[in-house]
Image (cartoon, rainbow, N blue to C red):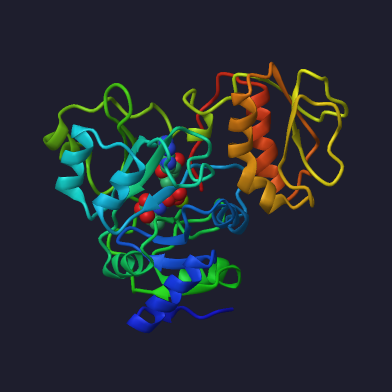
Amino acid sequence: MPEPRAADPDAISQAARLLKAGELVAFPTETVYGLGADARSDEAVASIFATKNRPSFNPLIAHFAEVAQARQEVLFDERAEKLAEAFWPGPLTLVLPRREGCRISLLCSAGLDSQAVRLPSHPVARALLAECGIPLAAPSANLFGRISPTLAQHVAEGMGDRVAMILDGGACEVGVESTVVELLEGPARLLRPGAITLADLERVIGPLKARLSGPITAPGMLESHYAPQAAVRLEAEHVGPEEALLAFGPRPLEGAAVTENLSPSGDLLEAAAHLFAALHRLDATGAPAIAVMPIPDEGLGLAINDRLARAAAPRPVEAFAESN
Ligand code: TXA
Ligand code: MG
């Protein structure tokens, strides 16, 4: 099991090299330890989900060194500018519209047209982000369903053998995940409470819409979640000439109007990496239906099939507690 490494300048530049090469590095933030990867790389983001053993895709936060970098990828309105000015760097995450040409992986947004962004204040996180110069996708560095890590040792115990490096920056000061605020059309909404309180936020931008009642709703279940216009037909064994085909593996069905193969070699990580972009492209062709070839229900296939099942059967959904 790789031991956590003290976050000296050498370790930080090695971590930055690993991240730029598409590897996963756990690093401290002021809230909890994050499991970091290049947010622009579909494959690197897919490996976050594989490493966390998540059975579904949850959108991830992109972390930046500077506000100017975040502004290149998402649209800041006046409320976002005020909150960034008041609380960044710090434990606040803003969910903002993706810009046209946003370079952050669609898998990081879980197919939504919004992207969560944050500037952490922890000196090690800041040094690492500055050294890499790229946005880092980073969920809490725990396995699915386990508690969030506030010490490097927690990360080592939970997933030490699954990451290229663990940067040790001591205990996380805040200890709970960042406050998440959605700033899309309509009133601002608190999606996840955290160290920046509702009162703190309201002092800066006025009243927020009440948090969704009950436990936090997983965004994958929200109506706003991207669903194709086309009907989605799962477990397809044949395909019609008007249909678009979402293929998987070396023997794609023949006869579709248009085909996207998630992974010609049948690799689930590659398939996860391409899922949302492929769905968007197929949907954009205007085909009335998307036929989806069977995808094995194992490893990342579970998360892929979860997403496809929702796309196939949009339905009102129950809230459930977050445990990512
Ligand atoms: O403090 C933190 O935020 C830590 C550190 C590492 O920065 N990260 C963290 O990430 O807690 P994660 O992935 O465990 O939680 C991200 C939260 C989830 O509740 C997710 O649903 C929400 O942010 N979120 C991310 N993108 C979203 C989006 N586009 N729309 C709505 N909610 C979003
Ligand atoms: Mg988490």
Image coords of residue 209 (percent x, y)? 27, 25
Q: Is residue 300 above or below residue 76?
A: below
Q: Is residue 267 left or right of residue 102?
A: right
Residue drawn 36% across and 78% down? 7
Q: Is residue 318 left or right of residue 265?
A: left
Q: Is residue 127 above or below residue 208?
A: below
**Residue 163 found in image quarter:** bottom right
Image coords of residue 164 (percent x, y)? 54, 72
Residue drawn 40% across and 40% down? 115
Q: Quadrant of the N terminus?
A: bottom right
Q: Is residue 205 left or right of residue 187?
A: left
Image coords of residue 264 (percent x, y)? 78, 48
**Residue 206 found in image quarter:** top left
Is residue 311 something one can see in this rendering? yes
Residue drawn 60% across and 42% down? 56
Q: Residue furthest left?
A: 203
Q: How many marks?
A: 0
Residue drawn 36% across and 44% down? 73
Is residue 8 something one can see in this rendering? no
Q: Is residue 16 left or right of residue 41?
A: left
Image coords of residue 137 (percent x, y)? 45, 54
Frontmost residue, 180 versus 295: 295
Frontmost residue, 108 versus 298: 108
